[in-house]
Image (spheres, rainbow, N blue to C red):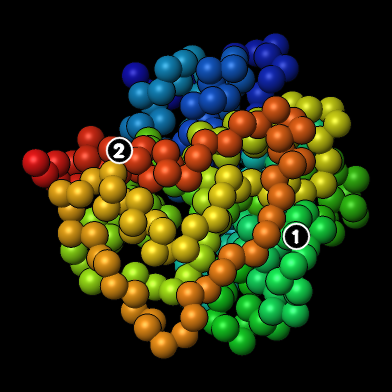
Amino acid sequence: MPAITTPPSGHCKTVCVTGAGGFIASWLVKLLLEKGYIVKGTVRNPEDPKNDHLRALEGAGKSLVLCKADLLDYDSLRSAVDGCEGVFHTASPLTDDPNKMLEPAINGTRNVMDAAADAGVRRVVFTSSVGAIYMNPKRCPDVVVDETCWSDLDYCKETGNWYCYGKTVAERVAWEVARERGLELVVMNPAVVLGPLLQPTVNASTIHILKYLTGSAKTYTNAVQAYAHVKDVAAAHLAVYESERASGRYLCAEGMLHRGDVVQALAELFPQYPVPTKCSDEVNPRKTGYKFTNQRLRDLGIQFTPVKQCLYDTVKSLQEKGVLPVMP
């Protein structure tokens, strides 16, 4: 059943989700519909079959509006947020190509925030990234990374990490506009997000796991990353939107694993796949992760799924979608 074009009148729980067809956003839309919200989801082309998974969600026929919008087109965003009491700005490129990353992430965020302010939106939840928090070589290894930490922009540029650079600047822009326009803003800073896919295409964080199962990656990198389950990330977005006491930034991650631990877990869970056993860096010491805290989200009632379960759910989803062959 196609999505309706106008929301029912008199409903006070109408929210907008930008980039509604994305990995996190799709789960957020699902959760919002289950909770009785009217959802206006922005997509590039509402008629594109790649958005069929949104139309198939329970409640979508009555409560989902797909709006054509572009992050760099203020007027389209203003139309999408009209009549909404809240906005979840999840849309963002995920790339280290500065030509594709910076303008949509930074100027797009400014457009969303201005549109929300002009529409009289009550609260904006902005999906930033842990990449806007931890990229700082000057930080002492014993420091516990929390919401007070910010990535070093010069370091992001020097290392070519334009995704972290773009997300950091975009978040700073969001806070700047919120202060200038009197907007109520809460920011989510998720780590690498794993778990089952609702959308038909494989996203970047899932490819990160898929390559270790297909044989395309013969080695694993000497790197450490923090992870979170997509269902927990979606639940955290809703929690900070609904909680009157929610404010500021929220680091969303369950645990941290070295890539060696990731491939070991995958090999234990799915021994039928050609998971690499060799590190690409046999010269330098094994890298260690930073300490972090997710206490602020736990205080709001978020219970985090263990990383090993995240890995399992990701692989099972890839199998179910036919992306990864089921091997005996």
Q: Looking at the image, is 119 positioned above or below residue 157? A: above
Rendered-image quadrant of the N terminus: top left
**What residue did someone put label 2 on?**
317
Can residue 75 be seen at all in this image of the molecule? no
Q: Looking at the image, is 144 positioned above or below residue 9? A: below
Q: Which quarter of the picture shows residue 184?
A: top right
> Residue 231 versus residue 146: which sits nearer the camera?
146
Q: Residue at x 28, y 61 (%)?
A: 211
Query: Residue 217: percent from the left, percent from the top?
Result: 25, 68
Total marks shown come to: 2
- In three-dimensional space, the C-alpha distance between marks 1 and 2, rounded to whole angstroms, equals 33 Å
Confirm or deny contact between disc 1 and disc 2 (CB under 8 A).
Answer: no
- The residue type indicated by label 2 comes to Ser
- The residue type indicated by label 1 comes to Val
Of mark 1 and mark 2, the one earlier in the sequence is: 1
Query: Residue 274: percent from the left, percent from the top?
Result: 18, 59
Q: Which mark is residue 144?
A: 1
* Crowd tier of the residue under label 2, counting other residues whose Cα lies within 10 Å: few below 14, some 14–19, many 20 or above: some
Q: Residue at x 23, y 56 (%)?
A: 213
Q: Which quarter of the picture shows residue 87?
A: top right
Query: Residue 136: percent from the left, percent from the top?
Result: 70, 74
Query: Residue 58: percent from the left, percent from the top?
Result: 42, 17
Q: Looking at the image, is 100 positioned above or below residue 225? A: below
Q: Is residue 266 left or right of residue 168?
A: left
- Mark 2 element type: helix
Q: Residue at x 56, y 50 (%)?
A: 255
> Residue 289 versus residue 128: which sits nearer the camera?
289
Q: Which quarter of the picture shows residue 121?
A: top right
> Residue 72 versus residue 12: which sits nearer the camera?
12
Q: Is residue 110 left or right of residue 321?
A: right
Q: Residue at x 11, y 44 (%)?
A: 327
